[in-house]
Amino acid sequence: MANRLLFERDVIRAVDKHTNDKNQLDDDISCILEEVNPVVLVGLKEATDSLKVETKPVQKQKRVELFENEDVVLEQRGNRYYLSLYDKKGNFQREVTIDVKDDYKVGLCNSK
C-alpha cells in the first residue's frame, strides 16, 4: 500500500471501532486503516502551501548503559538519564526521564 495522508480523527474513529472491551484490536492495523479514506488535496499547490511541516534535525546521542538487571535498565544520553522499567516477563512498562541541568537541578518526567 502506498503512503497516504489521513486525518487523525478518522484513524482514531477506525481504531476505536475495532477495539474490544479488553482494549485489544480485533483485526490487523493495516486492515483497519484500509477503511479510512485518504485526504484528497484539491488545488494541489494551494493545499500543500497551507500544510504545516515541521522539520527538526534529529540529534543522535550516544547511549551509555549504566545499570541493568531483570526489570530495570538505566541509560545515559547526554545530560539525561533514562530509567526503563520492565515487568517480570520482560515487557516494557514505563520510562522515567531524569534531566540534569547545568546547575545540577534534576527534573523528572514519566512516559509510557
Image (cartoon, rainbow, N blue to C red):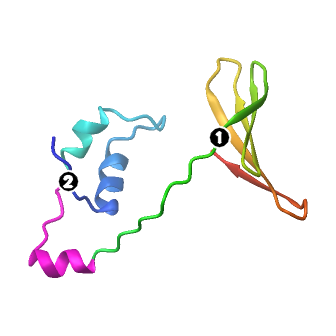
Residue type, label 1: Lys
Q: Which residues are magenta?
A: 36-50
Q: Comparing marks 1 and 2, which lies closer to the viewer?
A: 1
Q: Residue at x 28, y 74 (%)?
A: 51
Q: Where does label 1 land, which residue?
A: 62
Q: Quarter of the image holding residue 34? A: top left
Q: Earlier in the sequence, mark 1 or mark 2?
A: 2
**Helix, strand, or loop for circle 1?**
loop
Residue 84 horizontal/vertical position (percent) = 71, 35
**Between 55 and 96, which is closer to the camera in this rendering?**
55
Q: Is residue 94 above or below residue 39?
A: above
Q: Quarter of the image holding residue 95? A: top right
Crowd tier of the residue under label 2, counting other residues whose Cα lies within 10 Å: few below 14, some 14–19, many 20 or above:
few
Q: Residue at x 34, y 74 (%)?
A: 52
Determine if the magenta segment contains residue 67: no
Q: Residue at x 38, y 41 (%)?
A: 19
Q: Residue furthest right?
A: 104
Q: Where does label 2 land, which residue?
A: 4
Residue type, label 2: Arg
Q: Is residue 18 above or below residue 5?
A: above
Residue 74 horizontal/vertical position (percent) = 77, 34
**Helix, strand, or loop for circle 2?**
loop
Labelled pair 1, 2 in contact (Cβ < 8 Å): no
Determine if the magenta segment contains residue 48: yes
Q: Is residue 79 left or right of residue 28?
A: right
Q: Is residue 15 left or right of residue 36?
A: right
